[in-house]
Image (spheres, rainbow, N blue to C red):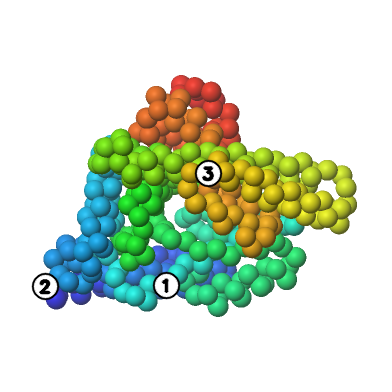
């Protein structure tokens, strides 16, 4: 058994080295150092994970964490069978170490435009953010971008997907989530493994957000029943998502109108602050319509373009994607099948979503 375990680790190391070598040949020095940083931390997560079945048998974790692990398996099976998500070997291992690194996400945007800065990488194309496992590295990049005169935002990520390159483990932070939130996260990441379009992050994230929300409702209804508190919580999350999407879309449209005007750069910055101030007041007014506290932290540290665009990356087009699903007989599986069928023919799938009118439209 020890030999088999060491052999698997050896194969994993070889695979990572090959990938790093390939990336090194097509990246600049800064890009390569960033990729090496990410890959080394990803390798550690995989190397130090244990099999879920072993974690369930032993006393490595508490009983409530074991329940969450069993729930992950049920969510994965539901996603594959009922939603048409790709079958993988993800989530068969779990990383239980308390030193699990936080993933810090850095995004940037010009102060007078809603054009989020992107970084190009092999395989995945343009990405609208950088992820760091080290806080100091993240702060250093944030400061560098700020010195360039950009709006900058730093947040954190709760989960991630390696898009099938590796067997993603369950991480211990996920075992602390509520059943509904855990379901949303797992289905979100499974969506990325199923359909992920190179360089089309806004399409990828809005789609995954939709599947996480509506998939969680379906899973809760099937598992616990229509009137269970978990089902009601999932339904409330969807209701709040729609309300927040409408608010955010309106705010971004006001900013786009301002930034596209002919006034000077300085005037745009002055007027955008007025829009920011007004929007925060409007947000307070709409909070009575929220059924959860999921969005209560919006704008607590102030607003800038990078912050808004990083949120919009996941939320801006939610209602449009929901209309696409409704147009496919309200079926996630039907929608995914159609999107996979036509995605190879189009360079901009988000544009297709915006112009969607019927499930049979291919133009």
Seen from the viewer's position, the closer of residues 67 and 150 is: 67
Q: Secondary structure at mark 2?
A: loop
How far apart are labels 3 and 1 at the CA level? 32 Å
How far apart are labels 3 and 2 at the CA level? 53 Å
Residue at the front extreme of this rendering: 288
Numbered label attached to residue 290: 3
Q: Secondary structure at mark 3?
A: loop
Residue 241 spot, x, y in % from top left: 51, 42
Q: Nearer the viewer, mark 2 or mark 1?
A: 1
Residue at the left extreme of this rendering: 1
Circles 3 and 2: CB atoms closer than 8 Å = no
Above or below, 87 against 135 in this view is above
The picture quadrant where one finds residue 359 is top left
Residue occupied by mark 2: 1
Residue drawn at x 33%, y 44% as measured from the top left: 229
Above or below, 353 against 173 in this view is above
Residue drawn at x 75%, y 57% as measured from the top left: 111
Residue 205 spot, x, y in % from top left: 49, 47
The picture quadrant where one finds residue 64 is bottom left
Residue drawn at x 58%, y 35% as measured from the top left: 351
Circles 3 and 1: CB atoms closer than 8 Å = no
Query: Upstream in the sequence, badge 2 or badge 1?
Result: 2
């Amino acid at each position: 058994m020890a030999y088999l375990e060491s052999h698997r680790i050896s194969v994993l190391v070889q695979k990572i080295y090959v990938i790093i070598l390939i990336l090194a040949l097509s990246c600049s020095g800064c890009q390569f150092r960033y990729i090496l940083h990410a890959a080394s931390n990803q390798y550690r997560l995989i190397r130090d994970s244990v099999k879920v079945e072993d974690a369930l048998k032993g006393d490595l974790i508490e009983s409530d964490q074991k329940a969450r692990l069993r729930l992950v398996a049920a969510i994965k099976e539901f996603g594959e069978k009922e939603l048409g998500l790709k079958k993988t070997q993800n989530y068969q291992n779990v990383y239980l170490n308390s030193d699990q690194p936080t993933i810090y996400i850095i995004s940037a945007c010009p102060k007078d435009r809603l054009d989020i800065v992107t970084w190009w990488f092999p395989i995945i194309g343009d990405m609208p953010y950088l992820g760091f496992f080290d806080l100091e590295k993240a702060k250093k990049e944030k400061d560098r971008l700020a010195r360039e005169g950009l709006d900058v935002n730093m947040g954190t990520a709760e989960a991630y997907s390696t898009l099938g390159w590796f067997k993603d483990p369950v991480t211990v932070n996920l075992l602390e989530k509520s059943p509904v939130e855990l379901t949303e996260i797992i289905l979100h990441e499974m969506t990325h493994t199923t359909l992920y379009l190179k360089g089309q992050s806004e399409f990828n994230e809005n789609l995954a957000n939709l599947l996480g929300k509506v998939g969680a409702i379906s899973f809760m209804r099937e598992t616990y029943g229509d009137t269970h508190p978990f089902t009601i919580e999932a339904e409330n999350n969807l209701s709040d998502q729609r309300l927040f999407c409408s608010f955010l879309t309106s705010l971004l449209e006001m900013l786009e109108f301002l930034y596209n005007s002919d006034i000077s750069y300085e005037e745009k910055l002055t007027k955008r602050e007025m829009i920011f101030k007004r929007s925060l007041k409007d947000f307070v007014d709409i909070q009575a319509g929220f059924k959860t506290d999921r969005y209560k932290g919006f704008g607590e540290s102030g607003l800038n373009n990078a912050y808004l665009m990083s949120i919009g990356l996941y939320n801006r087009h939610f209602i449009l994607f929901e209309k696409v699903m409704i147009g496919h007989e309200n079926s996630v599986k039907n929608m995914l099948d159609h999107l996979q069928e036509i995605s190879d023919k189009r360079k901009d799938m988000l544009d297709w979503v915006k112009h969607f009118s019927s499930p049979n439209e291919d133009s």
